[in-house]
Amino acid sequence: MDGNELFGILYYPVDYEPGKKYPLVCEIYERFFDNGFNSSMNIIANQGWFGLRPSVNLEIGYPGEAWVKGVTSIINKLIEKGMVDPHKLGVHGTSYGGYAVSLLITQTDRFAAAINISGKVNIISFLGDSPRIGHRNYGAAESGQDRIGATLWEQPLKYINHSAVMFADRIKTPHLLITGEGDWNVPAGNTRELYYAMRRLGKECVWVNYHNDGHGLGSAADEATYLDKWKRILDWYKTHFAKGGKEKGSSLHIPGPPQFF
């Protein structure tokens, strides 16, 4: 979109047939360079879907723009090639990637389903969530991975603009939120803020919180949690791909209570 050439890693669905259009699931984070074995993308490919890990070009002070530019551009290319069904697009991410997913769907409604795994949704309340105050959360926002490039007091609007919960009213994509109560990195309570917001607005959102597990629900979880997490992820995509995106943005669905395990 900005004239920069970026790369993504595409995992083909099992039994791929040229000329056929398939659902696509993106896993987003920052930049991806390793095109070797990836467990999550192989799980996706074995459902008969494309798995995509797109790189994005993050700019200090404007990180939120990177995902909507990079992710949508590469999807457009695959649609142009006749490979992907534009009504069956999914997106998920873990940690910083989960944060990116929630922020991304405040800017576009083209996804049929989205999943945030252990990702914050409010960068302002996140500043004081860590016991390692000053070392972790403030540093991450001001000069680290979050790339705000300024303190909260220097650029308060940038912190608002990069907090998905502030724009929950714009979200039309069914959203699954997955957290671990034992998460030392991104407290489950931060992600919960978006669940409360979307429920208040009558939007489709489910929050699943695993009480005995930690960040990402991968190596920080037991086998039963890992399997349950992936069953929920795949069921979320299958349910909304079956709808073909036709029910995106319905304001008639009132979510039920959160689920705890």
Image (cartoon, helix red, strand yellow):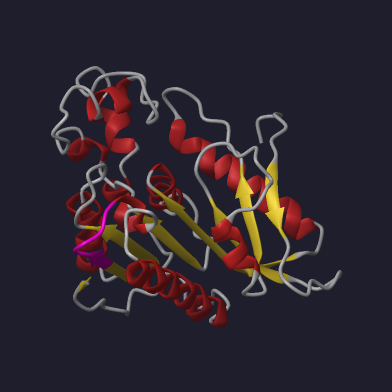
Q: Which portion, as a residue range, is magenta?
A: 208-214
Q: Residue at x 32, y 29 (%)?
A: 158
Q: Residue at x 71, y 71 (%)?
A: 22
Q: Where is residue 251 in the image (x, y as percent from the top left)?
A: 34, 74
From this view, report whether residue 182 is shown above or below residue 42.
above
Q: Would you say residue 112 sits in the magenta stretch?
A: no
Q: Position of residue 82 (x, y in %)?
A: 80, 64
Confirm whether residue 15 shows in the render: yes
Q: Position of residue 59 (x, y in %)?
A: 50, 25
Confirm whether residue 204 shows in the render: no
Identify the image quadrant of residue 31: top right
Taking the image as shown, residue 176 lies to the left or right of residue 4, namely: left
From this view, report whether residue 200 is shown above or below residue 148.
below
Identify the image quadrant of residue 115: bottom left
Q: Residue at x 34, y 38 (%)?
A: 162
| Total numbered labels | 0
Taking the image as shown, residue 129 lies to the left or right of residue 45, namely: left
From this view, report whether residue 66 is shown above or below residue 144.
below
